[in-house]
Amino acid sequence: MNRWKNKRIMVTGGAGFLGSQVVKKLQEKDCQHLIIPRSKQYDLRDPQTAIALLKDTQPNLIIHLAASVGGIEANRKNPGSFFYDNLSMGIHLMEAARHIGIEKFLTCGTICSYPKFSPVPFQEDDLWNGYPEETNAPYGLAKKMLLVQGQAYRQQYNFNSIFLLPVNLYGPGDNFDLVTSHVIPALIRKCMEAKEQGKDYISVWGSGKATREFLYVEDAAEAIVLAAENYDGIAPINIGTGQEVSIQELVHLIVEETGFQGDIRWDPTKPDGQPRRCLDVQKAKHYFGFEAKVDLKTGLRKTVQWYFNHRR
């Protein structure tokens, strides 16, 4: 990354699932001045703390990945904190960045910001054509307000802020907690534990009819680094594979990769979430040359192997 090689780059959430992969990509690009703030030292929900962080570190580029996240159940239990945490961290950090005259600010949004019944594949122009799916609307709307903030700051202050909309991520290092995790790590853990404990079935939420799109975490990190270097536009950009899979198909792929041989029992009393999710990813390819490399089957195999090696 010649543009940023000798610059000071801050990655909030840089020790997390996605952030650690972004940091790795930047290190491979010979970026020598990386700043990775930790929440125990800098609580970005506090505006004075955000100001102090930037005064202490003086970054040129901020890649804002810090977030409070979780699956459907976590969103249902924590809508207030998910809304407040994600909105306040972004608002305060971007305002502080504006005051120190930062060169560029990249915000990572979420596919949860899209309306519940967006036409498939989701196009960036459809982002405001309805309300998000209810179970994760507070999280999705909080993230979407950071797009508004960035565009407003660009208009008034000539602030170079860009906004990416990644699809559901998965891969090595994911959160495998059954209460707070997303669908792929939760299913992998269920299958592995059922196999080890000799259980003859696993229970899966919903009907299996909902569809999702999944992006391997290393591909997502590559997209973020490419956008940081090459994209300076005002419009949000989708980040994904453009490939849609039903939850039922996903379960069968995970069953195959884990070697679980029991039954699948669907629980229709639990929500499916958004009916369909799949992105139009042409703008990412056009503006900064991103195309996902890891197909779902390969990515699942790598994720299952990582969990098998690290779960203890």
Image (cartoon, rainbow, N blue to C red):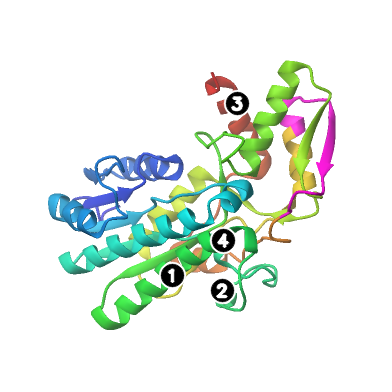
Residue 305, numbered circle: 3
Residues marked 2 and 3 touching at CB (< 8 Å): no
Q: Amino acid at mark 1?
A: Met
Cα separation between marks 1 and 4:
13 Å
Dot 2 falls on a residue whose secondary structure is loop
Labels 1 and 2: the sequence-earlier one: 2
Q: Amino acid at mark 3?
A: Gln
Q: Which residues are magenta?
A: 255-272
Labels 2 and 4: the sequence-earlier one: 4
Q: Is 250 in front, or is 207?
A: 207
Is residue 59 at all visible to an observer of this figure?
no
x, y percentage for residue 104? 28, 64
Is residue 17 at all visible to an observer of this figure?
yes
x, y percentage for residue 147? 42, 70
Cα separation between marks 1 and 2:
12 Å
Q: Is 194 in front, or is 81?
A: 81
Q: Which residue is mark 1?
A: 145
258 magenta-colored: yes
Q: Is residue 74 left or right of residue 93?
A: right
Q: What residue is rendered at 58% in x and 40% in y?
A: 181
